[in-house]
Amino acid sequence: MMQPGALRFRAVIFFVTLICVSASLYSASFYRRDQKLFSEWHAHAPVSVDKNVSFGQINPQQWEWVTSHNLTYPLRYSSRAITTRMVPGLRRASLTSIEAPLFENFQTIESVLDVKDSPTQVLELEVPAFKKAPVKASHLIFGIQTTIKRLEDSVPQLARWLAYTGAKLCVVLLEAEGVPVDTERLVALETSMRSQGFDVTLLPAQEGDTFPQRYFSLVSIMYQHRTPHTQWVSLIDDDTFFPSMHALLVMLDKYDSGEQQYIGSLSEDWWAVQHYGFMGFGGAGVFLSIPLAEVIDAHTDVCKSNLRSSAGDITVMDCIYTYTPTKLTPISDLHQADMHGDLSGFYESGRHHLSLHHWKEGSVFGKGLPMPDMHLVADVCGECFLQRWQFGDDMLLTNAFSITTYPNGHLKHGDPNEVNMDKLEQTWNSNMDMRHSLGPTRPRLVLEEEKIQYSFLNATIYDGGVRQLYFHKGINGDLDTLLELLWRDAGLE
């Protein structure tokens, strides 16, 4: 006789199947409107705040977004206008050296309205060629389990990489742990997200399911939502961020989706790998081919009922290793980001990250990183997000994270204090062993002595480009410093 729990789960699957039918009809309509959606995406892409403003010249009315940061005056200010030129065939470099300084003229201001136009020459930087329209990813389905409040808060970051791509999104929702989601609120959010370019289906969590059971059930839910074109289903967290969908698809295209594939990333912490297993850690993104998802779906009841952990990604691993010979294919550029504390060294490494996680936890300003704002610059320069440029022999730009200066010669070639910038600076407070994931590393530099860090503060859209602010709090009586970069795309070479 089938157990009551299994009966309840089958009932949910039946309900999901009904939703799948309507979702499939919706999806068909979605793709028939493909050109219309791309037009809508361009309408929502970076637009001009004031089309009468010349590049590098900021209208006083455009400083309103800065005043919300409650800066202390007087402060030091400098800016630089940058154009990016796309070069076909150019590969993204970890570090590119520029002989010229990034900033030439500083001024002391009592208000942002005191900023005077600077005659500084526009700087041109070469970047790999990229397409500005969203990729077409209708062969992917992503799955999340979370609370409805966290999903509402996550829409801006999801919009940066998922909206208008054609990829499906299935989300299992609660109001709070142990509290069913409000149906009207669910329907309203689903309608809102669809209007913003998401092919999304929101589902109430099955009553009585624990956290790992809700996570594990996503595999069957996504499998039920598949179309003849679906190749991959992916388990992610609500704070999983993919900086480049194009790069993600390039990675997946290396693997035969017609075979059983289990793709993901180990934790950066070797202790976690030893303790939890050789598995794809969920926050980095776990990718399952449809043939593998089919096997999991066929064994959902038994796998879901035999949990050995409170972690859903462990249940996924256990089910795969119990019923298939498939083993994890680890991808080091997918990141669980299990480090805690100051992750500057991770973000300033210049490495090409396929996914980021735990960025909501904290930053130098005591709150989560403003990832959607940080990522705005990708609209101008594609894969240049978190790319590094060295200016002169003492300044380093990690695009959309920080500008750092090194007063003791750490960037100067041949200097006794020169450090190897190919090694990742271990800035977090941990003795974890991560040689398998983030090595090689180097010791942390002393802030304010060996390394001065101007941290990303905010970004906004202006006149077809992106304005970024970087901030450093003065110490020992020094003024605070505000640095501004104004980015614009100059097109193909």
Image: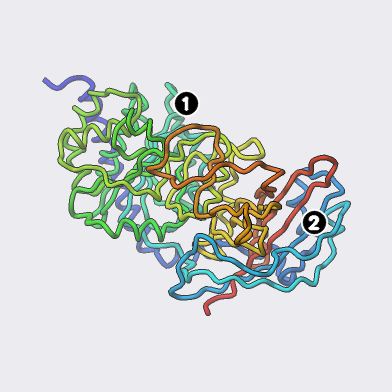
Q: Amino acid at mark 2?
A: Tyr
| Depicted 108 relative to depicted 34: above or below | above
- Residue 347 is left or right of residue 276, and the answer is right
Q: Nearer the viewer, mark 1 or mark 2?
A: 2
- Residue 419 is left or right of residue 310, and the answer is right
* Mark 2 lies on residue: 77
Residue at (34, 34) in percent of width and height: 273
Position of residue 111 measured from the top left corner of the image (x, y, whole percent) = 86, 52
Q: Which residue is outermost to the front?
A: 416
Position of residue 170 measured from the top left corner of the image (x, y, whole percent) = 36, 43
Q: Which residue is outermost to the bottom?
A: 493
Q: How many marks?
A: 2
Residue at (35, 61) in percent of width and height: 250
Q: Nearer the viewer, residue 125 or 25?
A: 125
Residue neighbourhood size for the residue with mark 1, other residues' Cα within 10 Å, grouped as few (<14), some (14–19), many (≥20): few
Color style of the picture: rainbow
Position of residue 59 measured from the top left corner of the image (x, y, whole percent) = 79, 64
Disc 2, SS: strand
Residue 464, by quadrant, is bottom right
Residue at (48, 64) in percent of width and height: 92
Disc 1, SS: strand
Residue neighbourhood size for the residue with mark 2, other residues' Cα within 10 Å, grouped as few (<14), some (14–19), many (≥20): many
- Residue 69 is left or right of residue 329, and the answer is right
Residue 463, by quadrant, is bottom right
Residue 224 visible to an observer of this rendering: no
* Mark 1 lies on residue: 176
Q: CA distance from mark 1 to mark 2?
A: 45 Å
Residue 419 visible to an observer of this rendering: yes
Position of residue 248 measured from the top left corner of the image (x, y, whole percent) = 38, 56
